[in-house]
Amino acid sequence: MTALRQTAVTKAVPLLQALPLAAILIAFFVGPVLLVVAVSFFDYQTWDILIPDFILYNYEILLGSETTYRTYLNTAKLCLLAWFFTLTIGFTIAYFLAFHVRSVPLQIGLFLLCTIPFWTSNIIRTISWIPLLGREGLVNQGLMGVGIVSEPVEWLLYSEFAVILGYVHLYTLFMIVPIFNSMLRIDRAVIEAARDAGASGFQILRHILLPLSKPGMAIGTIFVVALVMGDFFTVDVLGGAKVASVGKTIVNELGYLQYPPAAANAVVLTIVTILLIVALMRIVNIRKEL
Amino acid sequence: MGEQRGPTFYILAAFFGMFVIFLYGPIITIVILSFQGPQGNLVFPMNGFSLHWFRELFTDQPIGDIHGAFGRSIRLALMVMVLTVLVSVLAGLAYRRRFIGATALFYTAVASLIMPSIVISIGIGAGYELLGWTRTWYGSTLGAHLTWTLPFGLLIMFAVFNRFSPAYEEAARDQGATGWQTIRHVVLPIIAPSLIGVALFGFTLSFDELARSSQVTGDLNTMPKELQALQTNTVTPVIYALGTLTTLISMAVIATCVSTVLIMRARRRRHGSDAGQGV
């Protein structure tokens, strides 16, 4: 009897320990996300922004508009470009840190150097591009000073270029950390064996490091895609009025207190984000099969 | 790998150097520009050096409420930090044994991490609206921030406990320690440096959070929201001064955490094992 009670208590302990986490996630994540799905079927009016109902109106308007498709396509394009650059730069940096820096304290130091900006403000880091890229910014001053151009280059700021630059600046670290982590787990004996068997540096990279870093690349991909698809600040600050994105559209709708249309858009955005992540995982997988 | 450095090394090292400049260059620009003279502009050239724009920060601004927002964000970040550490450690301990719903809870935490932030923000905002509750920085915003910091905390705790040998606890239990004594005197001291890492995530991620806060802060703004508003409205380097100040605070927090961990490690190395000293 005592033994039985003992097991019951032992079984209850981890449940109780996990309870605060579960409660917070249910209250502020699971509940709200389900609510977004529900609200996307709600009705709304100027004086009553949430009228519980089950109408398809918000989706009909959203999916019936050509602008929607153009905005989604543009967001996906920004996302793919950001993914490509963060992945290639992140992989190169991680590769350098993991295999070319030989002293461990230096490795840790350089790794920290790459991660510190993660703990500072993304808003400030985004804004800080403006005095560099603007019409009278440092880059244009430099280019004109050297005489490469006679007129300021206009596409540096408030353009897709600036937005991608901002994403690469903010999110490359989400690639570096997991890829570096994967690379540190690679058994050095495998590389030695390949070298002894006559593999070139490129062959080692292509046939050993690339496939074995895949888990890290996958984690980085999920982060970058989710962050870029959900962004509304960087695209607003660096893209200006010229660059459209779903996140910006949603925030605009919320600004007019149009919750149900924003919710419908958010539901579609989430689905597209998940599909995009799945598709990108496939690409990485196919490479391994080749 | 002890052979001579090839050209690849130097190419990669140069690439790394350029990346670091790319990473820190813009923020250094902002810091320099925040010392613009009183007549200075948003861009170079510098029009003299002064602390004018920092002084502006501490005098009343025509728009916004920088002081209030600053205080709120610091207090909120401290609350998020404490809760993130407590809840993550408890959950981390839970995951060392089996419990019902463990897998579901783990995937929920991961989903909370990667869900586009704006979706969570709309959901919490709509929930408060429907319930007729008032959105506050210490209520709805606190909850929104926890959906972002707790998954990070949980993942760190996983990494910690994966490397944690249960032999220490078994030894303590064999000596007659109760469950609480084992945690208090054996487990917590060993994982303490990692907890500082969790605290660092909790504080800084909350202090800089914008996307999840966007629909849930109510009437009183947090600092990042204030910055966002300023960004669209201000045409003076005062925003750079604010950026410099915010970055300084983040840097101070990071430095405190890193040095605390280093001091802890050094002390451990100096004192070495205390086996047998408790008798």
Image (cartoon, coloured by chain):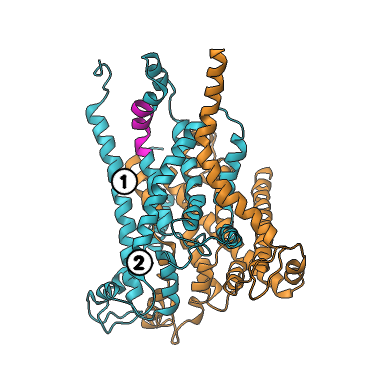
Is A281 left or right of B244, judged from the image as shown? right
Q: CA distance from mark 2 to mark 1?
A: 29 Å
**The residue stretch that appears in magenta:** B184-194
Image vertical order of residue B233 relative to residue B195, above or below: below
Is A25 left or right of B230, judged from the image as shown? right
Please report, as a chain letter, where disc 1 is located: B
In front here: B134 or A251?
A: B134
Measured as percent of width and height from the top left, residue B69 is found at 37, 65
Sequence-earlier tag: 2 or 1: 2
Is A272 left or right of A101, judged from the image as shown? right
What color was chain B assigned in the picture? cyan
Query: Does the magenta segment cover residue B186?
Result: yes
In front here: B198 or A40?
A: A40
Is A279 left or right of B25, judged from the image as shown? right
Q: Quadrant of the C terminus of chain B?
A: top left
Q: On residue B258, which mark appears?
A: 1
Q: Residue at x 59, y 34 (%)?
A: B102
Image vertical order of residue A1 relative to residue A212, above or below: above
What color was chain A assigned in the picture? orange
Q: Residue at x 74, y 63 (%)?
A: A53
Q: On residue B68, which mark appears?
A: 2
Rendering quarter of residue B190: top left
Measured as percent of width and height from the top left, residue B189 is found at 33, 31
In front here: B47 or B119?
A: B119
User: How many numbered callouts?
Assistant: 2
Say few, some or many: other residues with alpha carbon within 10 Å of mark 2 (under 14 / 14 to 19 / 20 or more): some
Whether residue B64 is visible: yes
Measured as percent of width and height from the top left, residue A28 is found at 55, 51
Q: Secondary structure at mark 1?
A: helix
